[in-house]
Amino acid sequence: VLAGCHSLVSIGSSSTSKIIGDPLDTASLEYSNWIFDPIQKAASAPTTTTPKATAVTKEEGSGSSLVAKKLWQIKSFPFDPNLRQSSALVLVLHGDDKYRLWKVVKGSPDTMFPFLTTTTTTPILRNDDNANGGSTTTTETTAIKFKRWYDDTIQSLESQGMRVISMGVEEVAVLPLDD
């Protein structure tokens, strides 16, 4: 997400260019080891894949992982203080040599949560003691369990003084393009 949703620009000639922008964007790109090409507005995965540099998606029904190799920022929508988020459309080349169009978004955790929730309800059985001393079985949706984890994680990170940004990806299309 961070390799595609950013406001980075290059200043100077190609041999002496310097990438500037939001400090979070520059630090995130550096940490990921992705290589940013400001002329193409593209980012390439490192040649040696580390866990922090791998962008993986799950293909519906197949269960196979697809690793993103390169992405191009097609359109960037800068940070909007009213929405408290920024977004971009990116073209992603995966390891299976298929191109996919992604919508990537990052922003404040409270405004991003509605975009991150699932509409799928998966029952989770939980035994609760009732007033009669017995137990009853209740169900809890995946969305409720995710919300609890999400809020707890954000609270924990913020209590440590960390800046918390939530990110999400939505695959818009798989494109039948040739290299």
Image: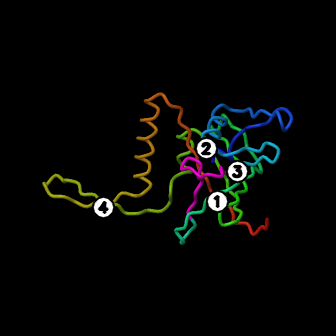
Q: Give the residues in magenta.
A: 45-58
* Of pointers 4 and 1, the one earlier in the residue sequence: 4
Whole-angstrom CA distance, mark 4 to mark 2, is: 38 Å
* Amino acid type, residue under disc 2 in the picture: Ser
| Above or below: residue 27 compared with residue 177 | above
The spot of residue 3 in percent (x, y) is 67, 46
* Of pointers 3 and 1, the one earlier in the residue sequence: 3
Q: Nearer the viewer, mark 1 or mark 2?
A: 2
Residue at horizontal 64%, vertical 57%?
Answer: 68
Question: Which label sits on residue 125?
Answer: 4
* Of pointers 1 and 2, the one earlier in the residue sequence: 2
Task: Residue under label 1, please give it.
Answer: 171
Q: Nearest the camera: 45 or 111?
A: 45
The spot of residue 54 in percent (x, y) is 58, 52
* Amino acid type, residue under disc 1 in the picture: Glu
Instruction: Tally the numbered discs.
Output: 4
Q: Is residue 147 magenta?
A: no
* Amino acid type, residue under disc 4 in the picture: Leu
- Tags 4 and 3 touching, CB below 8 Å: no
| Above or below: residue 13 compared with residue 55 | above
Question: Which label sits on residue 44?
Answer: 3
Q: Secondary structure at mark 3?
A: strand
* Amino acid type, residue under disc 3 in the picture: Ser
| Above or below: residue 32 compared with residue 72 | above
Task: Residue under label 2, please give it.
Answer: 32
Q: Residues within 10 Å of mark 2 (few under 14, many from 20)?
A: some
- Residue farthest to the right, as pictured: 13
* Of pointers 4 and 2, the one earlier in the residue sequence: 2
Q: Secondary structure at mark 4?
A: strand
Whole-angstrom CA distance, mark 4 to mark 1, is: 31 Å
* Of pointers 2 and 3, the one earlier in the residue sequence: 2
